[in-house]
Image (spheres, rainbow, N blue to C red):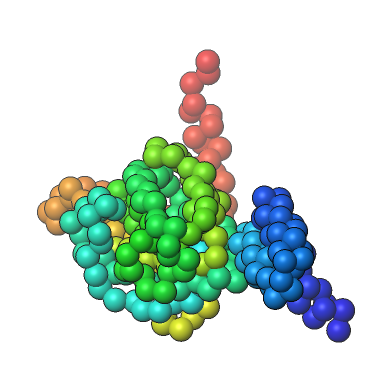
Amino acid sequence: MTEDLERKTTPWMTGGLDWEGVAAALASLLVGLLLSWVWDPLFWVGFAGMIAALMAARWAKRTAPDLASGIVAPCDGVVVSVTPADPPGELRMAGAETTRIRISSSPATTNRLYAPIAGSLESLITEDGEQTVPFAMRPDADGLAISYLLFESRAQQVGVRIATGGLGPRQELEAESGDIMRLGRVFGKRRLGGWCDVYVPAKTGQLIWPGQTLIGGETVLGRLESDRDEGSFETMSGEAGELPLGVTEDESVEDDDYPEPDEADTPDDPAVMLARLKEATKNKPED
């Protein structure tokens, strides 16, 4: 019973609120109280602003999995679709075929963004949104605040497109092009949810499906190809029964100077063997 209680309460104990969000929430509450002196219903305007500020300030501490060549979710959310798609030009990805994993995040999700792979941040492009767009109802709507990030590891690339509403300070990135990142490292914030498109190589081993809930920085989306994958050992070991590389069948026969077991002259009597050893010792020249 105690273990179950700890398991349920631990996620809440590893999170918190950003100080700027708390300050904005208190300011909104104060504005609501001042407006209530003019007209009582106006208090709820400030109260709604306080709730929005607190939701935007939520964050959680995450532990990335110990998985070589792994791809993790860049944010919290739900998988909407997993389909083949061409990446946008802003990502500057190579011409290889890619699969798009589209993630939808509600305004109540935590605000941290996590590096999807261990590698380098090759490209970063941001577009400011319009203040008239409070929420990202559609991933391709006009006026959204959008960020394009290209991560690379061992010549394999993963692109991330992050979109949210343009009203207020919604995106804050804490990384620059050329930065080296570990898997699951926090590289910024996106407040009040939005959309996230992750573009991975088409040959990536996928471990997710539409409708699945993702935990940013922890849930594994798939795995990049590595040197340990099947097929990489074909030039190293060969098929069973094959000769070593560089040795022909004739050479292997000619170089076999070892006698067959029935040709070896090995005495069966231990006394004979001991006598031969003593004779060899006597005949050995002294130093």
Q: Residue at x 51, y 64 (%)?
A: 75
How many numbered tags mark residues here?
Answer: 0
Q: Residue at x 37, y 46 (%)?
A: 124
86 with respect to 117 (left or right): left
**Which residue is most to the right?**
2
Q: Quadrant of residue 76?
A: bottom right
Image position, residue 62 (x, y; %): 63, 60
Judge whether 4 appears above or below 108 on screen.
below
Judge whether 249 appears above or below 78 on screen.
above
Question: Split into 4 quadrants, where in the image is the N terminus?
Answer: bottom right
Judge whether 175 appears above or below 235 on screen.
above
31 with respect to 118 (left or right): right
Residue 153 in view, yes or no: no
Q: Residue at x 80, y 80 (%)?
A: 4
**Which residue is most to the front?**
38
Image position, residue 145 (x, y; %): 40, 57
